[in-house]
Image: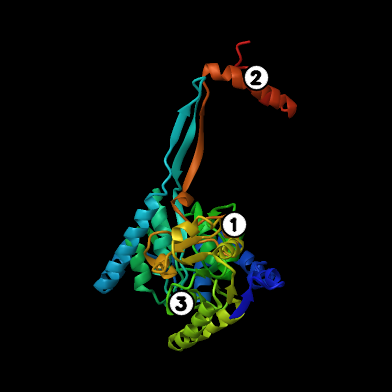
Amino acid sequence: MKKLDTQSPDFQAELKALLAFETAQNPEIDRIVADICADVQKRGDAALIEYTNRFDGTSAQTIGDLILTHDDLQSAFERLPENIQTALKTAARRVGSYHKHQKMESWTYEDEDGTLLGQQITPLDRVGIYVPGGKAAYPSSVIMNAMPAHVAGVKEIIMVVPTPKGERNDIVLAAAFVAGVTKVFTVGGAQAVAALAYGTESVLQVDKITGPGNAFVAAAKRRVFGVVGIDMVAGPSEILVIADGTTPADWVAMDLFSQAEHDEIAQAILIGTSQTYLDEVRTAMNRLIETMPRRAIIEASLGNRGAMILAKDLDEACEIANYISPEHLELSVENPQEWAKKIRHAGAIFMGRYTSESLGDYCAGPNHVLPTSRTARFSSPLGTYDFQKRSSLIQVSEQGAQKLGKTASVLAHGESLTAHARAAEFRLKD
């Protein structure tokens, strides 16, 4: 891992270079995705079957071969050992409980003229959740995307998940059962995104698509945005740990590994106020890496984008954290709630030495779909509010129309919109 020191005259340049990540769209991927999306939009189920067979090595003959029903999901759940069933139900319950606190409610008020104003909250009708498949199974992604939609009151939750060579993962399907998914299509890639966005003979068009995927999925989500809503276009996973030296070095080392093991371009950064402690963590990492099944990925990640930063104090560490705006921020310090008040930009803040980031990934309650690549400066975690809409309510009283109409008339004439002005004027008594 790179070593950075805030007292170095080159620190800001070194930090900026460390965080730099090429997020520009790949023209070749965009071209392929554009062709796939257009083909699915034109040929529907036939194109979906063809691309799924080609890219996932399946042999589906009809769209029915790619559909799983509620009974299929329940069967997958019942095939699992009891401890896994319990873990899935516990995670879903905790995530659901947390997201109930986020649910927005309608409200109204009357002004002094008797005009009623307010906001009406309604759930989306139908959403699509994309769950990655292939290299690994992600039941946690199912729960994190489906539960807030379920809590929001979405009537139909359609899940798409690739099944390379037709291999279906019971844990993923069981998670869909527990989280209230309505129907599952065993398709992935840009073709799945296109099917959700445009609809086919068998896939009903959704209102919003959420969930992470590879570069082709990300490109497809960008392309269909506007036809449907999307949550975000996620970048590589990130963790930033601020440590004051009171947490065992082994714990911090493993927390850094927990994100580095995602892939070679994930980012793990440690900020400490003691060089001695940073050295202890480095020693722990060198020892613990020997036990990691994904050692090659971790080493590549840490070598490519990892760093240890020596800060003069925790105040400076927090300011650096605000600049980095990490997806996951661990405050592994004494009095973490006080230091959290100094954090303005982070996807999720994990407070205290016992709060490992991995607990948030699976079962703490808050969502693990978080802004990456410094987008926490202006965006938020996935939540119940992402599956609800706000409609403004306006009911102007006769008295209110006399005052508002005159104001609107003046402004409309100022914009040379005569019909706007007269629509307001017609309701004036004088």
For residue 217, which quarter of the picture?
bottom right
Between marks 1 and 2 in the image, the one whose residue lies nearer the viewer: 1
| 41 shown above or below 79 | above
- Locate residue 414 relative to residue 304 in the image: left or right: right
User: Mark 1 and 3 residues: CB-CB less than 8 Å, in contact?
Assistant: no
Q: Is residue 308 left or right of residue 169?
A: right
Q: Amino acid at mark 1?
A: Arg
**Residue 206 at what x, y percent from top left?**
48, 54
Q: Quadrant of the C terminus?
A: top right
What kind of element bears circle 1?
helix
Q: Is residue 114 above or below residue 381?
A: above
Residue 76 in sight from this viewpoint:
yes
As drawn, the label of residue 363 is: none
Query: Which residue was labeled with disc 3?
Result: 164
Give the alpha-carbon distance from disc 1 to disc 3, as whole Å. 37 Å
Residue at mark 2: 406
Residue at x 39%, y 62% (from the top left corner): 143
Query: The residue under label 3 is which amino acid type?
Result: Pro
Residue at numbered disc 1: 377
User: For the residues carrying marks 1 and 3, which lies nearer the camera in this image?
Assistant: 1
**Nearer to us in this view, 62 or 401:** 401
